[in-house]
Amino acid sequence: MAGLDERLDRVHRLIAAIEARQKELVSVAVRETGFTRRECSMEVDVILRRLRGFDDMVATFAPRRPLCGSEQEVALVLPYNGSAWLNVAIASIYLVGNRVRVKFASRGSEVSRFTESLYGPVFGGNIRFDYSGGRTFLEHAITDPKIPAICLFGTDKYAINYLDSIKAYQKKFVFEGPGKDPFIVLPGADLEAAAQELAFSKYLYAGQTCTAPERVYLHESVHDDFLERFMNYSRAVRVGDPEDPETEMGPVASTRAIAAIRAQLEDAVARGGRIALGGRIEGNLVYPTVVVNASQDMLGMREETFGPVSFISSFTTLEEVIRLAGDNGYGLRAAIYGENTEAQGLAEELVGEAYCHPVSEMTFGIFGTVAVNQPRSESWEGAFVDKPVGGYGYSGWVWETVDGEFILKQGAKLLSLETSTED
């Protein structure tokens, strides 16, 4: 494997290759993901900036040793809800000296082929693309002695099934999973800024990101004012053909997600919720939908929605909202808007440790990242580069065996650091 300077040079060459074919990448991404041309263009711009950010990680990476030996490689399983950002995951594992075997989601085969065409001339056999089925790929990775570590983006219900196999083969398993992120608005918040941010982060990619806010908790004193502002932004979203440059939100890609949204809306109404806006589904187009009077027992408050649907509830005290926000199986990210001192105090109650750490069991009620009066575009800057991301509960974990002892870790992490060791 080449030295760090040469590996960085190859990432610079990848950046140049992406820039040279940026329009083509955007077109491929729009066709295959269903995300809008505007969203895919923005994603490429963000990811080019993040790839350049690896230059600032030289001092961190230099003393580290890859998990892989010369004939080994890290297996990386990627999700379907992305195109350009997946390059950051690949590069972060490669830059610490690992060879990488990459498996895109089956529905992302065109994006995968395009990405492979960029990588081949730059990385040669150091980064290889695999087109076997997902289950076949993962089971091979677990049993193959030439693969010491596996990084999987996916669902917790799928990943948890491999616990016994990971233990038996003593592999390192880094999992990045779903979120059910709370968005909390306190008295004293800038309601206009908060409503604008909720609308942007909720409807970006039609809500098909693990960090899209899904549970909205409004203090009773600001509930009506905030709701009116958020509903106005929601009504203004231009929904339609993702190829149209004017379209702001396209379809939901997964038919399974569509079925889940229908079930969540039916359940919400049956449990006393009210669809205050939207609820309209045409094929895979889900129009911006707002459910009010949401309760914790609703499917839409407990299970990931992965679509442009918000479930809104009110609270009266900080103690109550701490309990409500933490009452969920997922602990990826939370967002808080309010007067700075009070909001920061709430954040300290909800956030976990700065970096993933050993825990005795799955840990619930805290989050890997908590943003205070800050849009996601800022709080997520540098994600997977120099900003550790990930969560608690079923939102993510690391399994590994060290000196014969099986260890569970939770919290925010970097793929680069988890696929390397201190020299």
Image (cartoon, rainbow, N blue to C red):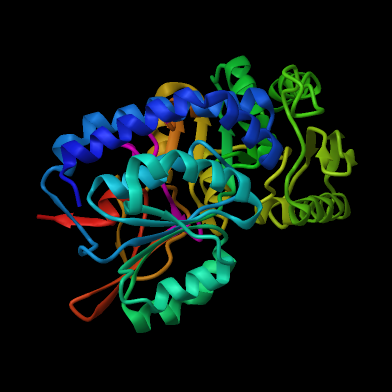
Q: Which residue is at 26% across, 51% downward?
A: 417
- Quadrant where the C terminus sits is bottom left
Placement of 264 over or under 354, stated as above or below = below
Placement of 232 over or under 104, stated as above or below = above
**Can you give x and y, in whole percent of width and height, for residue 165 in the image?**
43, 81
Horizontal side of residue 28 vs 71, given as left or right: right
> Of helix, strand and loop, which mostly describes the magenta segment?
loop
**Can you give x and y, in whole percent of width and height, for residue 49 in the image?**
39, 25
Please report the bounds of the magenta region as a residue range. Answer: 381-396
Horizontal side of residue 149 vs 108, given as left or right: left
Q: Which residue is at 41% across, 42% downward?
A: 119
Residue with the most extreme front position: 121
Horizontal side of residue 224 vs 51, given as left or right: right
Is residue 113 at least partly visible in the picture? yes
**Can you give x and y, in whole percent of width and height, for residue 369 in the image?**
42, 41
329, 406: nearer the viewer: 406
Q: Quadrant of residue 259?
A: bottom right
272, 331: nearer the viewer: 331
Q: Which residue is at 31% across, 54% downward?
A: 356
